[in-house]
Image: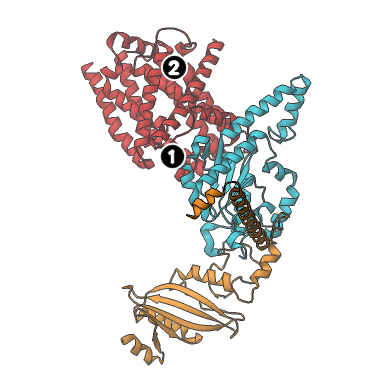
Chain colours: A cyan, B orange, C red
Amino acid sequence: MESGFYGSSLDGNLKCKFEESGLANTHEIMEKAVRWFRSRSIFVVAYGTGCGAIEMPPTFTSRYDAERMGVVGVATPRQADLIILSGYLAYKTLRRVIRTYEQMQKPRYIMTLGSCPINGGMYWDSYNTIKKLDDYLPIDVSVTGCMPRPEAVIDGFVLLQERIRNGEKAGWEKYDENFEFYKENQKRVLGGHIDPSYETDWYNLKSGGKA
Amino acid sequence: MDLASKLEKLSLELVQKQDYLYSVTIDFERLESLLLSFLNEFGYITLDSINCRDDLEDGFFTITYCLQTEERDHVVMIQTKIQRENASLPTMHTIWPQAEIMEREMHEMFGVDFPGHPTLIDFALEYWDNMPPLRRDFDTLEYVNSMNPFREQRNDALDAKEEMKKKREAKKAAKLKAQQEAEAKAALEAQNNPSDEVKNEE
Amino acid sequence: MIFQIILLIMLAYVVGFIYFGLYRNITARIQGRYGPTVYQSFYDSIKLFSKNNTVSYGWMFYLGPVIMATGAVLTLVLVPVFSDSDFLRSVTSQGNLFVLLYLMVLGPLGNALAVGTGGNPFGVMGVVRGLTRLIGLELPFYIAVVGLIIAANSSDIVHIIDVQKTAGLNIINHPLLFIGAMISMVGFFGASPFDIPGAPQEVYSGPRTEFSGKFLALLMSQGSLFAFAKLVLIVDLFLGGADSLVMLVLKTFTIFVAIIFIGIVYGRYKVEQAVDFLMKLPTLIAVLGLARIVWFG
């Protein structure tokens, strides 16, 4: 159990305490239990980019009902565990997605739908679309297809649940470890402007849009 | 039609494209006054869209203003040509407010300047510092390859043609083998009980 | 006494979460899907408690959920759970209905302070919506409670339960008050048509927008505690309390299912529509009930 399971700050302390008191086994059991609860309760923020957004409503509503596996949609990234990116990502979108992903609390996971985040898909020669999302953000599950049916999306949820339950190394840990690599790639494409600037005054665009 | 005769007075030709669609070609100097007279005198009050076409070989942009009547039964396309280098157009946002965002898009995609336009800022792109992407001298493929290289091919990727060939040959061989086996079996059976063969022949 | 309080909180926690699991399950069945397990709210709560928290807006932001939880726990402790026995009734004699009514508003106020510190516009919008709605919600409920106090000639909940043993249940004696109180109870539970503060399609999660991980878990827990306390309060006031755990679960569950069904059938009001409605029909019903008590006994 190398992975920072309780989040980066708590894990070391807790583990040491347990080992000092001769309860290293308890720590493992606790980890297993918490992992199980995590796999049973996944809050999703569905970031609808591209055409895949249309597959999300049937996945979460009566027809396919992802809630029976504990997968529920939430409204804000603060509460979410999983972000679903459902299609191609323009540079403009990538900025927002990075911002959204970094607002999510650890542990956090990414799932992509379709072939566009993998190799650009049919937008491979667009001047404004990225080709390989895994250069910029760590992906946990890629559901392929153009577009994947809700059954495939649910299959992706099951795969993610298994991975969480088995304690496999998750994407957010890779992101923390290779932070420099990801940031470098993001900077290369986005030209250093990673966050949308706070300076744009949306209410007074006529004065040049600068606050 | 009276529009044609009105335009004839201005020494312009009205070309009918479809039964509701007409086009007028005009030089750049008279564009603004013609647009105003279409609005005020001819009753074409709505600006549908402003389009731009890049004629790289001839060295100019073709700009098309689509105007529509209040009854929505006639559309006129007013075409004009401007130089590609330092392209500039009069802004129409004071007359048609919707022109503001159309001109903003054209500025971003083709680099056409609109003096006096209040919001020539980013429209769909953000922080774009290259050549405007819809100009035809912008090499999209080269730009894409420099920004987003292809994913490296997987090592286990196989040549589809050869694989299919192998598959077909294997299938053929299996078929041949089965046939030979069946023949041998039949020959063996014929040897064992020749009476059956006679019956079959009957 | 401490032991009893802890036991009460644990009971409320378990029952409240199972009720919320049932709420989700029943909703799912009505919508024609399988729905989550009954224990789904437990899973969510434990997962949220095990999450990291890196959001910081100063100490007032952290204090908000704590104030809400304080309000919920105090309300819970002051409501007598069983009608006959003194069990789990540790500090009930210290408070009466007036204290309870004050404590029920403590949560929203604490929330408002915290969300204001967070500065998220959706959170602030949610809080403003919630407080506006509260104006409408409190009116019929308070009138109904005043009616009950006049009828029982006491503001002590235990006394109100005792009166019901001889004079009959309040739901039969004062049905108008019950209807008025129930309509505002639907709002107190955050069910449609009064689910204005956290309206998901309008203001994201409303006041909860900026809360994550452990604080969200705390908010969920206090929500279930508070829900249980309110259900027990309604049972005490109108259904004569419960003399055993079975009766308690039966009565509270009946009220709860009624609220679920009302919530599923109706769509959401706008803020001003909700206040308008609550100021008119339920208030009128409650006032009629009050008038009946004042003039006809």
Residue C119: in sight, yes or no? no
Residue C120 is tagged as none
Classify C123 as above or below B166: above
Nearer the camera: disc 1 or disc 2: 2
C69 and A69: which is toward the camera: A69
Q: Assign a secondary structure to mark 2.
A: loop
Q: Looking at the image, which residue is at 50% across and 46% down?
A: A150
Q: Nearer the viewer, residue C75 or A111?
A: A111
Q: Are marks 1 and 2 on the same chain?
A: yes
Left or right? Give the position of B95 relative to B121.
Answer: left
| First reached walking from the N terminus: tag 1 or tag 2 | 2
Q: Residue at x 67, y 47 (%)?
A: A138
- Label 2 is placed on what type of residue? Val
State the image coordinates of residue C51 (x, y, percent, origin top left).
Answer: 63, 34
The chain holding disc 1 is: C
Chain letter of the residue beneath label 2 in the structure image: C
Where in the figure is residue C267, as x and y percent of width and height? 36, 40
Quadrant hosting residue C56: top right
- Number of marks: 2
Q: Amino acid at mark 1?
A: Arg
In which quadrant of the rendered image does the C terminus of chain A lie? bottom right
At horizontal 49% and vertical 37% (from top left) the residue drawn is A67
Report the residue marked by disc 1: C129
Seen in the picture, residue B36 relative to C160 is either above or below; the reply is below
Above/below status of A32 relative to A52: above
Location of the N terminus of chain A (image quadrant): top right
Q: Position of residue A114 (x, y in %)?
A: 57, 53
Report x, y in % for residue A13: 75, 28
Spot the residue most to the left.
Answer: C296
Residue C79, label in figure? 2
Specify few, some or many for label 2: CA neighbours under 10 Å numbering under 14, 14-19, or 20 or more: many
Instruction: Identify the element where label 1 is drawn.
Output: helix
